[in-house]
Amino acid sequence: MTTPASVMPRATYRLQFHAGFGFKDATAIAPYLGRLGVSHVYASPYLKARPGSTHGYDITDHQALNPELGTEEDFSAMVAALRQAGLGQILDFVPNHMGVGGSDNPLWLDVLEWGPESEHAGWFDIDWDPDRRYLLNKLLVPFLGDQYGVELKAGNLALKYDEDEGTLAVWAYDTHKLPICPLFYDRILAHENAGLDRLSDLFSDLPMWRPQVAERARALKAELAALLNDDAEARAALDAQIASFNGDWKALDALIQEQFWRVAYYGVAGDDINYRRFFNINDLAGLRMELPAVFRHAHARIIPWVEDGTLDGIRLDHVDGLLDPKRYFDDLRAASTRPFYLVIEKILAAHEQLREDWPVEGTTGYDFTNLVLGAMINPAAEESFTETYKSFTGLVTPFAEIVRECKIRIMENEMASELNVLGRDAGRVARQNPMTADFTRNILQRAIKQIVASFPVYRTYIDMDGAQEDADRRDLDWAMAQARRGDSNIDPSVFDFLHGALSGQVVAAPKSGFSRTAVLRFAMKLQQYSGPVMAKGLEDTTFYRYNRHVALNEVGGEPERFGISANAFHKANAQRAKNWPHAMLGTSTHDTKRGEDTRARLAVLSDLPEEWSRQVTIWSRLLRARRGDIGGNAPPDRNDEYLLYQLLVGSWPVELLEQTDEAALQVYAERLKGALEKSMREAKLHSTWTAPDTAYEDAMQAFARDALDTNRGGFLASFLPFAQRVARLGVQNSLIQTVMKLTLPGMPDIYQGCEMWDLSLVDPDNRRPVDYTVRQVALADLEPRLEHVEGRGSLLGELLQDWHDGRIKLAVTALLLDLRREQTSLFATGSYEPVSIEGGKSDQALGYMRGADDQRLVVLVARYPGLRETDPDWGDTVAMLPDGRWTDWLSGRVVEGGQAVKLGELFDVLPAVVLRSS
């Protein structure tokens, strides 16, 4: 698959659309983004989503724009403004699921109304024949805040009539619409009123209209609306009937029991849910995108936008949720006659490679995020850092054991129902063959739990053809070996059967005794399950429990790997240049746990491990002594305390480094409070989202408030000098991170606002409003001053001295985006090779060369700023610069190649040089 260069982005800028930032706002900043130097806006989803959505992934109507973002006219004006600024568009799109609940998803409402008979019943991944027989032909709707009976008696479920549609529905909290099936309208309409009595009789006759029941019901609803609009007596009679139901909860319950839905307390979902969700989120229901009708419906707006040039590309969210990702990618490519850029959100394990036969440009860049971070972490500090963490917290459990424990917890709680279904399906398959007929659902379910807990990757990719790639076979074999040890009480033959089923081997030969389709469908369903379990167990649980160095606890990251070698760094980049030269390169996203500059700061701690250890000990004594807890036994526990110190160091606002501003401090305190709450609840140790432990949470929040208390400033007096030093050193990491993103193989993305400092905490903190006025003014001031190469060195030196305002990062970003515009082919298809660095401090720098045709570019970056501050002399360390005359694009310095060049001379202005052959 080859995507033409004409639609390939040069660089993108991510915009998060929501009610506070719509099409008009994007229109207003289009000229600024064009001047900054990106080629495309990379937009969050803007199809119609749940009201108040801050991310857009909860789409409720694929046919319409989100009205909270603006009108169709506003959208057209935005598209025109982007084009005028020389910008194309990449759209984020989620094929896996839709937003459900509420009252605004017509497909979901139709399924609730008609159950298995709905024309959309097969569009969602619903099990209409579950083991929970009370849900036979019913859809569980777990949206209640308390038990069903409690909410029913309290009047929080109420029958209502919609005069515009002529429909009847039960509403939960006036928010969730639960349609009454027209087959039961006669229960409500029957009355002495002649008009209602006539319609009651007609509705009771609906079964005689099969298979056109729904069409006939629509006609009768229209008649009902007309009658009630014209006949006040009939309307009053219906209102009285409705009031009688709402006044008698037993009568309302009897009506509810007849429907195709079963409304329930949200906590029931973990055990009894019978539709596939996005992870464990009840109001995001999985779509069966493998069905042609679903595919056509979901892409009814997207594909025409590609065809007419509104979109040059698509970013696909959560592709591992799809039953058959490759088939979907093929279908998507085939749906458009115009080529387009296509990248996918795919989390890769360290040993895992993206499938080369997938017709995509690459991933959305989480692997790159962690690669660049790894290059900034000093591996030599691992032993010291680990010892500090263990001695401070008392925690010694290996990371891998925590992951396994958390995955099992997810399967036994939030996602137990899906595990039950897999056990049932495995049992049905096993009973097809006498040799496996005695494997019970319980024993199979236990084995499946061990297998999924042992998966070293998010999922494998066997499909209905039954072919298994070597990578899948390797990962499945590993999981099986670990699973057998995980529960040795399970008969080995059970694992043998499941291994054969998940690999397709039990049906590889004819007359196996098993249904080939049933076996492969079971394997593919388990693949859909293993991904969410990994995500919830690793990203959303383990990453909040294991706090050795939280910068490493990033989406797609491996916190147990403390930094990477230069060889590993070069190997990864060379592979991307060869196989995925247009993959997206990201350092901040709407999902990253920490902002890119927060991580860059925290990376500095690996340069100062002994000082860090001393500081946290001092801070803990200061804060706990104030609370009368000399022994350190009162809450919060030491692990959460250790997390707090890292969050403070990483995200401490620039404006609070040198002076105290009570208003700014209060804003920061609220941000920190939200991050701590999420961290505690996601860790699921002392508190959870479903059962918050307010006593523990209050203790943690009070501890954080004490740290920020300026009236008792012992902690702040100790903390601020260290925070100032780390922040200053972190600037150097931020700059080399920016340089690497904009020069390494791939297509760089700038997350909204990150052309200046991004000291965000976990979402939703990273979706705060961006001050584009500040950025536009700064860029307008810098543009004329950056035009001439000769004067850049002194300008960038001044900006680095005054780094607090973020203009140094903006200047470097604009300069390198301009270079990408000048040397498009070099960055789009250029080769990659390491530049040799030799000498006593060779480990403190990285170098690489990009080349295409007669264009060459050498990039050198200095890492470990804490070490260099302590010992700034580079000594005999040199870079072996290729032949030629080179000009640093950033400083304007001219360097002669073909010789060893001293790094001390190259890094006298910035911790990076970008040498262009001349």
Image: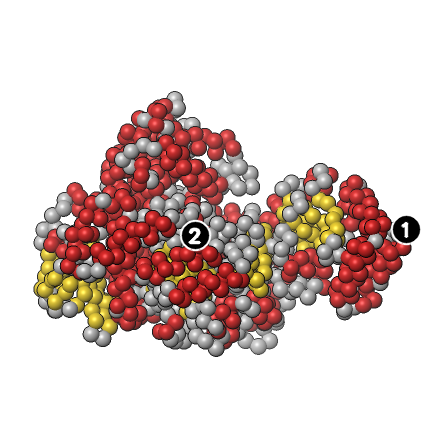
Which residue is most to the top? 628
Task: Give percent across and percent down for residue 108.
Answer: 64, 58
Residue drawn at x 52%, y 34% as measured from the top left: 693
Position of the N terminus, as image quadrant, is bottom left
Q: Amino acid at mark 1?
A: Glu
Q: Residue tagged by mark 1?
A: 192
Residue drawn at x 79%, y 43% as measured from the top left: 243
Residue drawn at x 17%, y 44% as measured from the top left: 869
Mark positioned earlier in the residue sequence (2 or 1): 1
Position of the C terminus, as image quadrant, is bottom left
Spatial separation of the CA atoms under disc 2 and disc 1: 59 Å
Q: Amino acid at mark 2?
A: Asp
Residue drawn at x 83%, y 67% as measured from the top left: 208
* Residue mark closest to the camera, 2 vs 1: 1
Q: Is residue 215 left or right of residue 485?
A: right
Q: Is residue 185 left or right of residue 779?
A: right
Q: Is residue 248 left or right of residue 584?
A: right
Task: Give percent across and percent down for residue 416.
Answer: 58, 50
Question: Dot 1 lies on which element?
Answer: loop
- Depth check: give the residue in front, 261 or 595: 595
Task: Give percent across and percent down for residue 28.
Answer: 41, 56
- Depth check: give the residue in front, 218 or 827: 218
Q: Residue tagged by mark 2?
A: 591
Task: Give percent across and percent down for residue 105.
Answer: 62, 57
Q: Is residue 161 left or right of residue 296?
A: right
Q: Image quarter for residue 728?
A: top left
State whether residue 699 is above or below residue 163. above
State whether residue 423 is above or below residue 701. below
Question: Dot 2 lies on which element?
Answer: loop
Asked if residue 507 can be seen in this view, the reply is: yes
